[in-house]
Amino acid sequence: MVEGIIIKISGPVVVAKDMAGVKMYEVVRVGNEGLIGEVIELFKDRATIQVYEETSGMQPGEKVVSQGQSLSVELGPGIMGNIYDGIMRPLKQIQKKSGAFMARGIDADAIDHKKKWKFVPSAKKGDQVIGGQIIGEVAETSAVVQKIMIPPRVSGEIKKIVKTGEYTVTESIATVATQDGDVEVQLSQKWPVRNPRPVKSKEEPTIPLISGLRILDTFNPVAKGGTAATPGAFGTGKTVTQQSLAKWCNADIIVYIGCGERGNEMTDVLKTFPELVDPRSGKPLLERTVIIANTSNMPVAAREASVYTGITIAEYFRDMGYDVALMADSTSRWAEAMREISSRLEEMPGEEGYPAYLSTRLSQFYERAGRVTPLAGGNGSVTIIGAISPPGGDFSEPVTQNTLRVNKTFWALDKSLASKRHFPAINWLTSYSLYLDTVTDWFNEHSGSDWRDLRDKAMGLLQKEDQLQEIVQLVGPDALPDNERVILEVTKMLREDFLQQNAFLEEDAYCPIEKQYLMLKFILEFYDRAQEALKKGVKTEAIAGLAIKERIARMKEAKNETFGDHYKELQAEMSSQFSKVGGDAQ
């Protein structure tokens, strides 16, 4: 343990002398109140420390005491359903200790050390085990069974293991004889947040993360273990999109990081999530969700650490074989925290004042996503979905551009679409997914064998519409040939009846992939019938006036469970109406 003295204070950055012997990223206790800090720079016997709490009132001459470890989080039963701050202090426990306002220097265990959990062992005495191997289970909530694992760097023979019973997270449940001596294994383990947890191998992401949002699943899917960026100006729906993903996506575990968001937005999240019902189990969604809340008025250093805390929790559940979806809202605020700390360190600024290592930090964060084979085998994944808040909606700013370099999915939120009340306000022309080729086989198998062909055909029509709009604005739609006027009719259906969704309508808030496929197929069948009708001399006005268009507009309201029958009914009705106008394609 090293004890030094504060000689300089600049906001959340403190410089202390007599710190020879401390290491980079070592945790220290700063000042008379013992505030938590982390060493971020060393020069001779001087250490520069970022403090995770407010430093007002602190004075030079106060002591700094090293803790002998890097910033680590405690992982084990009791994480699920909890709400933490940026360095994994449980806010509910802190509220009980300090009231509505968080006192400085206050601390609380990340998970309850007194609560007993029923542990059911799956290993026995004499078994050879390796790091990451599962030796038992704890039913943490009705939605999550937490697998108790051997710590990653431990391997050897089980010398002793307890029987089925109730134990606290700090009690020894097994003893492993290793080459370096006996190691006691508990229900919980600690891991440094800045170090990725080790895996056996990374696999190609080939299974899509289904969100129930048609603009994402059908047009720009993200794979489990992939990365996605959601940039957008204020009011375009970044937070709502992420909350919708958290509720409906087919991940097993949700980790939601409110990184530097406004207090009222974070309050809304904290009020809403406990009331949300998990559509998979009918139980509270919070039973498989972890929330990290770091609002914009909280200490900036803790904001910088919050994304590492979140991704470490996600990796822990990934190693158990779960599919985890991590929502970071927003990485722009994280980058701003880095910029503020960098300026106080007097580092050479890069573009727009951000530190020169901005792209490196973003890469390190997003590269911790992946579909992996954990150390003990099986499969697990972490999918990272990061919201970006570019100033003025300018996608050319550094955070957006550096994120795009390391991301394979881009969901561009559009201010003009939001102004038109088109939600999700994701622009289908500027968004893209580089996972299309890897997930096509899965979609073809689980929705329809021509899924990719339909998707590409629809995108082609929407791109054609964008080109035609320039002509329409100059000379009006009547100047277009009949086949192009039909394209405008069909793309209007695609935009308003397929891409637009109503979050307040139960049948439309979540759209199963089978329904997505049939909806898209029917709209494109209408297009094909219309083109055949034109060849037979049917007027565009007659096609535009067909009553089936009204039924198409209301397809999204049809029951998800019986949509297959509804689709067949619509097909029969469409055939009848085209026959009446003389455009039967049969």
Image (cartoon, helix red, strand yellow):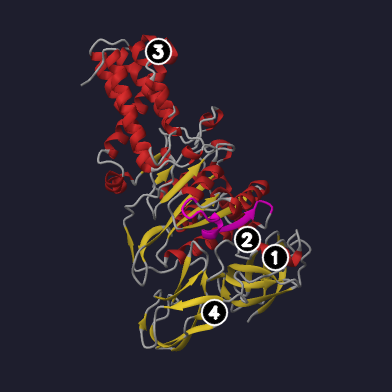
Question: How crowded is the residue under tag 3: few (<14 C-alpha within 10 Å), some, or many (20+)?
Answer: some
Q: Earlier in the sequence, mark 2 or mark 3?
A: 2
Which residue in the protein does label 2 denote? 85
Return the residue nearer the eye: 334 or 255. 255
| Looking at the image, residue 529 lies above or below residue 146 | above
Q: Earlier in the sequence, mark 4 or mark 3?
A: 4
Question: How crowded is the residue under tag 1: few (<14 C-alpha within 10 Å), some, or many (20+)?
Answer: many
Q: For the point 29% across and 19% down, which residue is it?
A: 576
Amino acid on which disc 3 is placed: Pro
The spot of residue 479 in percent (x, y) is 37, 9
Residue farthest toward the left in the current orientation of the protein: 586
Q: Is residue 453 magenta?
A: no
Return the residue nearer the eye: 123 or 453. 123
Q: Earlier in the sequence, mark 3 or mark 1?
A: 1
Estimate the spatial distance between the alpha carbons at disc 4 and disc 1, rounded to whole Å.
Answer: 26 Å
> Is the residue under label 3 in contact with that under label 2 (CB below 8 Å)?
no
| Span of residues in magenta | 279-297
Describe residue 241's horizontal placement relative to residue 449 as left or right. right
Which residue in the protein does label 1 denote? 94
- Determine which of the numbered discs, if any, sits on residue 166 in the image: 4
Q: Is residue 281 magenta?
A: yes
Estimate the spatial distance between the alpha carbons at disc 2 and disc 3, rounded to whole Å.
Answer: 55 Å
> Is the residue under label 2 in contact with that under label 1 (CB below 8 Å)?
yes
The spot of residue 2 in percent (x, y) is 64, 80
Q: Earlier in the sequence, mark 1 or mark 2?
A: 2
| Looking at the image, residue 480 lies above or below residue 49 | above
Return the residue nearer the eye: 500 or 116. 116
